[in-house]
Amino acid sequence: MNSKLLLCLALVLSDCLCGCSNVARADETNVPVSTNAVQSFVPATLKTNWTDTKITLCRTTGETIQLDAKCEVVAVRKRGMPTPIDVNVVAFVDPDTGNAWVGSSFGFAAVFYLETESGIVRGTMLFGSGIRAVRPDEHDVINGLVAFGHIYWDGSLVPNVQRGKNLDAVIEQLNKTNDLKWVATETHRERITFIEDSLYNVETGLNPWFFIGERHGKQFKDTTIEAINVSDGKLQLDLKNPAGSHKASVWIDLKTWKVVKVVQDRKP
């Protein structure tokens, strides 16, 4: 894994990953989680002011729309670490509903935005391995490690503005009471969805070992999301692993936020 990605994981996801790798797939893991990360960072520095970009937003009604967005780059450093990293802060609003999303993004490829009845959430899909995971099947353990696949659901630092307002209203509200460090490092984690399955039951589930990011020459590749679809209250994600040798489709119930079906390599 490249050094930038390792540092990103250490800065933002390490506490959450360790916590998740210590528990089984239980209902209590799908509850709001506080990252409490802000105090562990030194003051941040603005590197690039807001610039125009685009994002794709999926609605639970089945629509997919493209929206204007803005992004600023902030340099942050965790206490005890010598090197700062660049963090993208992304902001956008759905003018039809007034729902907004703004927060930090560490450049993961498998990131998507979903608009629900209660607002917009960002989904970040991550596969990895941990040494302290509790799993019911010893076949999952390879060299003392257990693989996992999670989707982290993060809410917005500014959840909404008045309907019809543009993106500038989101940024104005964000900057009213929040300093740069808070904006770049705070995460409103709402829940975590487990998408891995036991190797013992791989015929009816997903083998997370096939979907962990890997290096190809000088390039590091992650699992990608090839397609997103919402219908009948379920979110479908079509995945391709870094080598392109395995594919899987995952269905998530948008009421419970739990996986209800997985097909890997066309084997339901």
Image: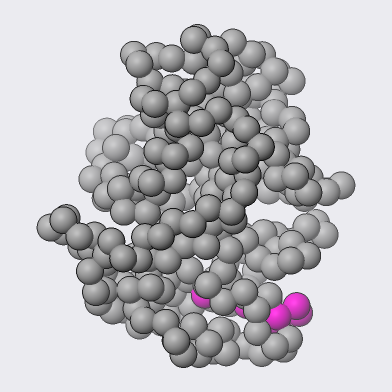
Give the quarter of the figure containing the N terminus: top left
Expressed as whole percent of the image width and height from the top left, the position of residue 9 reads 34, 47
Residue at the location (47% across, 62% down)? 187
Q: Please state the extent of the stretch shown in magenta in the rendering.
A: 91-98
Q: Is residue 158 left or right of residue 8?
A: right
Residue 22 showing in the rendered view: yes
Q: Is residue 267 above or below residue 118?
A: above
* Of residues 197 and 106, the one drawn nearer to the viewer in this rendering: 197
Q: Is residue 242 above or below residue 158?
A: above
Q: Where's residue 121, x and y in %? A: 62, 61
219 vs 191, nearest the viewer: 191
Taking the image as shown, residue 12 lies to the left or right of residue 57, namely left
The color scheme shown is one colour
**Residue 226 visible at all:** no
Indicate the quadrant where residue 213 lies. top left
Q: Is residue 179 above or below residue 128?
A: below
Q: Is residue 164 magenta?
A: no
Q: Residue furthest left?
A: 82
At which x and y percent is residue 214?
36, 32
Side of 84 relative to 102 (left or right): left
The residue located at (56%, 77%) in the rendering is: 158
Give the residue at x 70% y 63%.
115
| Percent position of residue 186, x then y | 42, 66
Image quadrant assignment for residue 199: top right
User: Does residue 94 show up magenta in the picture?
Assistant: yes
